[in-house]
Amino acid sequence: MPLGDSGNETSGEERLIARYFRPLATSPNAFGLGDDAAVLTPPAGCDLVLTTDGVIAGVHFLPSDSAQDIARKALRMNLSDLAAKGAMPTGFLLSIALPPGTQESWIAAFAEGLGQDIAQYRCPLLGGDTDHTPGPLSVCISAFGTVPHGAMVRRATAKLGDVIAVTGTIGDAALGVVLHRDEAVGKEWRLSSAAQNHLRERYLLPQPRNAVAEALRHYASAAMDVSDGLAGDLAKLCRASGVAAEIDVARVPLSEAARMAVSADARLVERILTGGDDYEIILTLPAAMFSAFRTAAEQAAVAVTEIGQVMSGQGVRFLRDGKELAFARGSYSHF
Amino acid sequence: MPLGDSGNETSGEERLIARYFRPLATSPNAFGLGDDAAVLTPPAGCDLVLTTDGVIAGVHFLPSDSAQDIARKALRMNLSDLAAKGAMPTGFLLSIALPPGTQESWIAAFAEGLGQDIAQYRCPLLGGDTDHTPGPLSVCISAFGTVPHGAMVRRATAKLGDVIAVTGTIGDAALGVVLHRDEAVGKEWRLSSAAQNHLRERYLLPQPRNAVAEALRHYASAAMDVSDGLAGDLAKLCRASGVAAEIDVARVPLSEAARMAVSADARLVERILTGGDDYEIILTLPAAMFSAFRTAAEQAAVAVTEIGQVMSGQGVRFLRDGKELAFARGSYSHF
């Protein structure tokens, strides 16, 4: 039933949902979650950018993960898509399916996490739907952003000779999820507890790069967010654009923690380059514009690193010391 | 992963999804499902109306129901919300979670059903997301429509003295779901097999009233779709509007099949008035406008019936032979 429908004769749980979610729907366009639908009026001359992404317990997170983190990650996955497309967030719809026995404290914590990110990213809750499910908890979000008409940054528009860059650091979440599921690995990788926490946090709570959305619109020829692994997602961008790419593995930006793990086990490079959940942005742009883009991104407190080049042909080659790395798997898959 | 992401190294299932869903994404705004996001450019002077609704196997349908019907019902639930708000459909996002062992033939049939309704309601697939789930099959749709700026038909704007009207017939789906789960009931209710089929069909495949969206914008003071039962949904509309309502039960429009069932078992009146899944529209409008609205609706081949009146106070009273009916439950809940 719609999120805000708390009737006279509704269950305790529906009242809880109205209690915890209605306060998040502060936009007048959400009608206090008290209607069948919400309304959006994009500014004149703007397009609306639409994306949808969801998480399922046991697939994208552990049922024991904190409700705050689950909520924030589900929203941030969508915010990351908007960022990569150069769009400014304008709101989202939330669909949530609750397993039997979901506690009030869980719903309260989920709403609290969501509320934090609604404020931080200025992306209001516009409406939603809730159901009970005999299956695992699942959350489906559709998020909306605006761009000037025709200015959405595409995936299919990389140009020959462009340089390839990424935001932030790559592979932290792919290592973090291993640590999160098996603490013992931290010793094997010779990581301090601070380094372990860093990697786990990068998995549990992505940092979508919405701060560089405007710079992407100005400088990027193509972009997408890295959610299924750098290797696989860059391959998608290249296929969509009809180009190939060469990446200099030594230039791929790693966090200090990831660097330490690789020193302990050099085989982790593959996990870093092919693992998922980075929620960084990969982009292409003319070489002459890289420095201006980097300056703009740094002003938004986001690091960017040039890691390779768009070539003619097909496929993505990862080069280290002049040799091509071969991966057992090209792209992380939740399946 | 996004619906259209079929990489070089993807699973057979991802290829199937690209094979069956990409052909449905014919809008240039969907980029062939080959980007992170879709784009919508609402016509100048228009608002976008946003709604989300989903279905879960074992909750909203039986796992044995046809994949075509599941797809169409999931989309039509959302189309019905757009209709009630006076909005013209412009597209939707689809999120689908597939249980282990989902067959290619199931995905093909699901896409076929979806394609039929995309064409019939001119509501293109703009993007989506697919995942595996250890739980039941679930489908989450967010649908978008347009209305002239400020013209969305609200729930909270019913006026004292307005008449109350509904489209189509009420209660068919509430009887249909009982028949669908237990065929033997048909005999008890003394229904011909044609009558049983009619009721079952009304449950399996709602008929959203998008054809009257424009007339609603012109004539309705308030409206919502009847998805959780006439009694409960009208109560929500009244609470949102700060009014009461009186319904003349004898005027509530019933199909021939529902009428036959009530003759066999008079207690079914409660199920008819409180059961869910009607996907008709309940609206309020000034009495002087009813006849013009009915004419406009009939031109769109949708029957409308006046069933009661907006009053001052609180609550909804259902009157039969001058006496108020009391219901054990006010509103159907899937919970």
Image: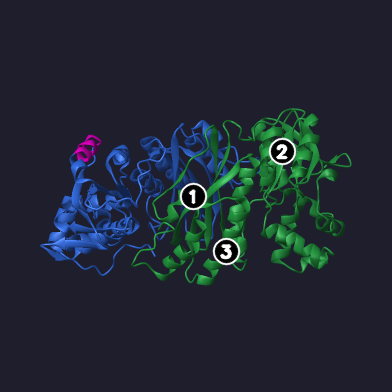
Chain colours: A green, B blue
Query: In the rendered image, is residue A133 in sight?
Result: no
Region in magenta: B292-300
The kind of residue tagged 1 is Gln
Q: Quadrant of residue A242?
A: top right
| Disc on the earlier residue, 3 or 2 | 3
The kind of residue tagged 3 is Glu
Q: Tell me whether circle 1 and circle 3 mark residues in contact (CB < 8 Å).
A: no
**Of labels 3 and 2, the one closer to you:** 3
Q: Which residue is label 1 attached to?
A: B103
The kind of residue tagged 2 is Leu
Residue that appears at 47% across and 69% down: A100
Q: Which residue is label 3 attached to?
A: A112
Q: Whole-Å distance between the Cαs marked 3 and 2?
A: 33 Å
* Left or right, residue A161 beside residue B319: right
Q: Residues within 10 Å of mark 2 (few under 14, many from 20)?
A: many
Q: Which mark is residue A283?
A: 2
**Of labels 2 and 1, the one closer to you:** 2
* Left or right, residue A142 beside residue B58: right
Rendered location of residue A305, percent (x, y) = 80, 42
Circle 2 marks a residue in which chain?
A
